[in-house]
Amino acid sequence: MDITTIDVKEVLPQRPPFLLVGKMLSYEEGRMVTQYAVTGNEPLYEGGSLRAEGLVENMAQSCAARVGYISKYILHQPLKIGYIGSVKGFKCFARPVAGDVLETTVDLVSEFAGITLCDVTIRRGDEVIASTSMKTALRD
């Protein structure tokens, strides 16, 4: 199955205008890469750029896309709703503007009992614009 042809709405509960993942680019065990083209119409777009909170939301949705893809396409289970448990060491080096294409890499650090810890990095081309360590939890 070509992951790039899957509609992200199949693995995420968010819907426009709060959907901040455009498509999944790749999946391998322990890593998911997503893409998002900034439109300028996002609720978290302000002052000519996507706010840091928008970057955190993109990171969280990218983590959720990983879990949703595994649930639906690997384990063949229903999707579960997840929550951000913590964000540690968040760094924002630049705020993207309309037209920027973001590539978000989610690297699994650990996973146990529905709690996942991932290192997440957002790139605009070759430039890292944000990074964090994010813990998420699934609702039963």
Image: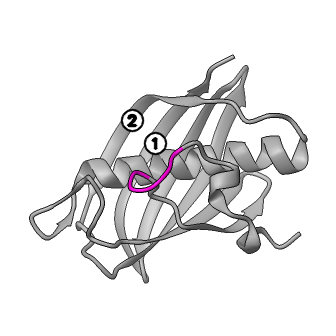
What residue is rendered at 74% in x and 62% in y? 27
Separation (CA) of disc 1 from disc 2: 6 Å
Q: Where's residue 24, x and y in %?
A: 65, 66
Identify which residue is drawn at 50% across, 52% down: 120
Q: Is residue 15 magenta?
A: yes
Q: Residue at x 73, y 36 (%)?
A: 79
Give the main secondary structure, helix, strand or loop, of the magenta stretch: loop
Quarter of the picture containing the N terminus is bottom right
Relative placement, left or right, of 9 versus 41 is: right
- The image shows residue 82, relative to residue 70, as above or below, that is above
Apparent side of residue 23 relative to residue 3 in the rendered image (left or right):
left
Residue on which the image places disc 2: 87
Label ID, residue 133: 1
Question: For numbered disc 2, what is the local secondary structure?
Answer: strand
Residue contact at pointers 1 and 2, CB within 8 angstroms: yes
Asked if residue 133 lies in the magenta stretch, the reply is no
Q: Which residues are magenta?
A: 14-18
Badge 1: how crowded within 10 Å, few (<14), some, or many (20+)? many
Where is residue 49? Give x, y as percent: 19, 67
**Could you tell whether 131 is left or right of 2 in the image?**
left
Instruction: Locate residue 29, reporting x and y percent.
Output: 80, 53
Q: Which mark is residue 56?
A: none
Of the 4 image quadrants, the one containing the C terminus is top right
Q: 11 and 60: which one is in front? A: 11
Q: What type is the residue that disc 1 sits on?
A: Ser
Q: Residue furthest left?
A: 47
Depicted 120 relative to depicted 99: above or below? above
Q: Which image quadrant for residue 77?
A: top right
